[in-house]
Image (cartoon, rainbow, N blue to C red):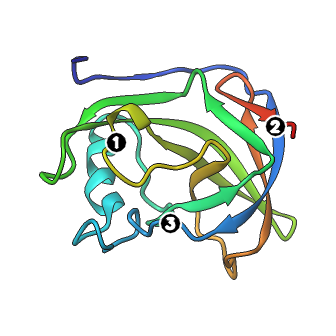
C-alpha cells in the first residue's frame, strides 16, 4: 500500500481540445444516491483541501462528459492523492486531478478532471470515454448539451477510437 501523500506538479500547459456531451452519471458526487446516503464530494473536498487542492467555489458535483468516439488516459496528473478514506462503506481510494477548461456557449469555466482510480474503486465504474469534471458553476447547463473541454496534453492523453 502506498503511503498517504500528495504531490503537485507545475508545468507549462499545452491545451488540447475535445468535444463532448453532458450525460447523467451515477449522481454519487453530488448525492445522496442509491450507494451513499451523502454526496461523495461533501466528504472528499475537505480531505483534498487538507492535502493541497482547494475546490471551494467549484460546483459540488461532477459534469459527466461523453467524449466518444475518443477516449482519455490520465498520465501525469497535477495532483494525486493516495489512500483517501472518505467513507466507511469501502476501502480507501486514490484520486488524481488535472486542470481543465470547460467551454459552454462561448464562455470558459475553470475546472479539474476528477479521476477516481479504477483499481481502488469497488463500484460506479466509468468508461474511458467519460470525463468527470469538477467545474465552476455553469449557468443553464443541462444533460444533452454539447461542450468543449481543454485538457493539458502533458497530463492527459486523448485518443480517437476507430471502428
**Going by the image, does 55 lie left or right of 70?**
left
- What SS does tag 2 mark? loop
**Residue at which label 1 appears:** 121
Name the residue located 57 percent from the left edge and 52 percent from the top edge. 132
Q: Nearer the viewer, residue 158 or 140?
A: 158
**Residue drawn at the location 40% of the way across and 62% of the way down:** 29
| Cα separation between marks 2 and 3 | 31 Å
Provide residue 131's location: percent of width, then percent of height: 62, 49
Q: Secondary structure at mark 3?
A: loop
Disc nearer the start of the sequence (1/2): 1
Residue located 18% across and 52% down the image? 87
Question: Which quadrant of the structure image shows residue 98?
Answer: top right
> Which residue is painted at 77% across and 51% down in the image?
68
Question: In the rendering, at what x and y percent does residue 84 appear?
Answer: 25, 38
Residue beneath disc 2: 161
Q: Position of residue 82 (x, y in %)?
A: 30, 28
Give the class, few, some or many, for how many residues have Cα within 10 Å of label 1's Cα (few <14, many ≥20).
Answer: some
Residue 28, disc: none
N-terminal of the pair, mark 2 or mark 3, is 3
Residue 59 image label: 3
Asked which quadrant contains residue 148, the reply is bottom right
Amino acid at each position: 500500500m502506498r503511503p498517504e501523500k500528495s504531490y503537485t506538479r507545475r508545468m507549462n500547459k499545452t491545451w488540447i481540445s475535445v468535444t463532448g456531451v453532458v450525460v447523467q452519471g451515477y449522481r454519487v458526487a453530488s448525492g445522496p444516491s442509491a450507494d451513499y446516503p451523502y454526496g461523495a464530494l461533501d466528504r472528499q473536498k475537505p480531505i483534498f483541501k487538507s492535502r493541497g487542492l482547494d475546490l471551494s467555489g467549484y460546483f459540488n458535483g461532477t459534469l459527466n462528459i461523453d467524449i466518444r468516439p475518443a477516449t482519455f488516459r490520465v498520465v501525469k496528473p497535477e495532483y494525486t492523492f493516495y489512500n483517501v478514506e472518505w467513507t466507511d462503506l469501502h476501502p480507501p481510494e486514490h484520486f488524481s486531478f488535472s486542470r481543465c477548461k470547460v467551454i459552454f456557449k462561448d464562455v470558459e469555466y475553470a475546472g479539474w478532471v476528477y479521476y477516481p482510480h479504477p483499481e481502488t474503486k469497488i463500484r460506479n465504474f466509468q468508461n474511458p470515454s467519460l470525463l468527470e469534471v469538477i467545474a465552476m458553476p455553469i449557468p443553464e447547463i443541462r444533460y444533452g448539451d454539447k461542450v468543449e473541454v481543454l485538457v493539458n496534453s502533458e497530463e492527459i492523453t486523448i485518443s480517437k477510437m476507430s471502428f
